[in-house]
Image: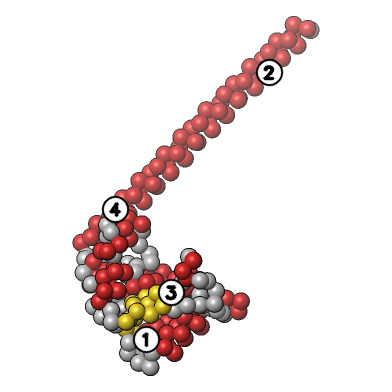
């Protein structure tokens, strides 16, 4: 009986070992299959991204043709954006800063066209008369109101404002190429040199000179 019990115990141990080995083989096979699927999906995404880039290269992006000092928005267009902000942001978020406006309104509006908001509104560009510098932490609505109060000809005046002039949906490499190898060749400097007026918009939230 002891020999029979020992034999059964040995057989059970062998069965369990074989079962564990089979389960490990199955797990390894599943892992290899899932890895292959992930790699295939990544390769497909890479091919799709490359095709999109190739298609974009075949169509010249207006941001690469229109001079930086023509990346402007009129006061009326800025006012229209303020109305959109009032409609979009309600409740606790009814006074958004520029960061929030860019994320919720500017980026979604510009993503498909792959241009800045100013070029989305003005496909042939709009020559700027006033370069505006400010801090993104400020209330967007207060920012627009401050500019409106400063210029009697607000509606017709054309402003160069960074978050509207520069494309907000571009990847780092694209932006780096657009900004140029040095600050003196950047859209900021080109626009600033061509504008007739320079406006600094302060705010009560953040000292723009300590950013």
Residue 184 in the image: x percent, y percent? 27, 64
Q: Upstream in the sequence, badge 4 or badge 3?
A: 4
Q: Which residue is mark 1?
A: 75
164 lies left or right of 98:
left
Label 1 sits on a secondary structure element that is helix
Q: Which residue is mark 4?
A: 50
Instruction: Estimate the spatial distance between the alpha carbons at disc 4 and disc 1, rounded to whole Å.
Output: 39 Å
Residue appearing at x 65%, y 22% in the figure: 16
- Contact, mark 3 vs mark 2 (Cβ under 8 Å): no
Q: Which residue is mark 2?
A: 12
Residue appearing at x 27%, y 57% in the figure: 181
Q: Upstream in the sequence, badge 3 or badge 2?
A: 2
Query: Looking at the rendering, which quadrant does residue 186 occupy?
Result: bottom left
Q: Is residue 60 visible?
A: yes
Say which mark, if any, is on residue 134. 3
Q: Nearer the viewer, mark 3 or mark 1?
A: 3
């Amino acid at each position: 009986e002891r020999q029979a019990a020992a034999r059964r115990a040995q057989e059970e141990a062998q069965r369990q070992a074989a079962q564990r080995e089979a389960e490990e083989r199955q797990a390894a096979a599943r892992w290899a299959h899932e890895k292959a699927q992930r790699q295939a999906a990544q390769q497909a995404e890479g091919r799709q991204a490359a095709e999109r880039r190739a298609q974009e290269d075949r169509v010249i992006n207006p941001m690469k043709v229109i001079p930086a000092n023509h990346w402007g928005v009129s006061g009326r267009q800025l006012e229209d954006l303020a109305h959109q902000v009032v409609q979009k942001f309600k409740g606790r978020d009814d006074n958004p800063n520029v960061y929030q406006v860019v994320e919720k309104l500017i980026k979604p509006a510009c993503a498909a066209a792959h241009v800045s908001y100013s070029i989305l509104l003005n496909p042939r560009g709009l020559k700027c008369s006033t370069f505006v510098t400010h801090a993104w932490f400020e209330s967007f609505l207060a920012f627009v109101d401050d500019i409106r109060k400063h210029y009697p000809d607000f509606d017709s005046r054309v402003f160069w404002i960074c978050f509207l002039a520069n494309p907000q949906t571009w990847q780092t490499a694209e932006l780096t190429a657009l900004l140029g190898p040095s600050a003196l060749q950047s859209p900021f400097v080109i626009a600033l040199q061509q504008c007739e007026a320079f406006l600094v918009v302060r705010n009560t939230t953040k000292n723009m000179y300590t950013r």
